[in-house]
Amino acid sequence: MKKTTRTGIALSCFLVAAAANGMTAQARDSKVHRLAIQVSSANPGVMQLALNNAENVLTYYADRQEKARVEIVAFGPGLNMLRVSTSPVKNEIKSLFEQNMGDLRFSACHNTIEKVEKQIGHPVHILPQAKVVPGGVVRLMTLEGRGWAYIDATVK
C-alpha cells in the first residue's frame, strides 16, 4: 500500500510540475512587448522617426509571432503631428494605423490642445486615429508605471 501511495504522490508531483511548466511557457508566449514613444517636437523628421520606430518594433515582434503594442504620445509642439491642419505625417499615420489596428495607438495631450486653442482662437481638430488624453507627460508616466519601455523620438 505504501508503494502505491508513494507512486501516486510521485505521479501527482510530476503532473503538477508539468502543468506549472506548461503555464510558464504559456505566460512567456503571451507576453506583450510594450513601447511608449514621446513626440514633443514640431520637427517633421522627429515625427517620421517616431513612426519608423513604431513600425520597426511592431514588425520585429510580428515576424517572431510575438505580441507588441506601441503608443505614440504627442504633446507641446509635437501635437502638430496629430492635428488635422498641421500634421506633415497624417498620410503615414493613417496607413500605419490601418496596418496595425489595435497594436498602435496615438495619444494627444489635452493640456496642449487647450493652450493651442487659446492661442489660435478656434478649436483644434485631432486626427481620427488619435485619442485625447488629459496630459501627455502624465500618460507617459502612467505607461512607464505599468512597465512600458519608453523612448523620446527627439532628434538633436
Image (spheres, helix red, strand yellow):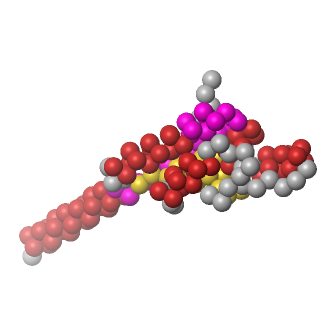
View extreme (bottom): residue: 1
Q: Which residues are magenta?
A: 29-50
Magenta span has 38? yes
Name the residue nearer the viewer: 19 or 105. 105
Q: Where does residue 81 sit, x and y in percent of width and height?
A: 67, 44
Q: Is residue 120 left or right of residue 108?
A: right
Q: Residue at x 41, y 54 (%)?
A: 67
Q: Residue at x 30, y 56 (%)?
A: 25
Taking the image as shown, residue 119 lies to the left or right of residue 76, namely right
Residue 11 against residue 114 in the figure, above or below: below
Locate residue 62, reporting x and y percent.
37, 52
Q: Is residue 45 magenta?
A: yes
**Count of numbered circles in the view:** 0
Question: Does 156 sit above or below residue 28?
Answer: above
Q: Foreground residue, 23 or 29?
A: 29
Q: Looking at the image, is 63 positioned above or below residue 39?
A: below
Q: Is residue 134 left or right of residue 139?
A: right
Image-quadrant location for residue 57: top left
Is the C terminus in the top left, top right, bottom left or bottom right quadrant? Answer: top right
> Which residue shows up at 75% across the image and 40% down it?
76
Confirm whether residue 71 shows in the render: no
Q: Position of residue 6 (x, y in %)?
A: 14, 67
Residue drawn at (44%, 48%) of the image: 58
66 with respect to 75 (left or right): left
Q: Nearer the viewer, residue 155 or 89?
A: 89
The answer to which image quadrant residue 9 occupies is bottom left
Farthest residue toward the top?
156
Can residue 105 be seen from the camera position used here? Answer: yes
State the quadrant of the N terminus. Answer: bottom left
Q: Residue 42, how many percent across, how many down?
A: 70, 36
57 or 96: nearer the eye? 96
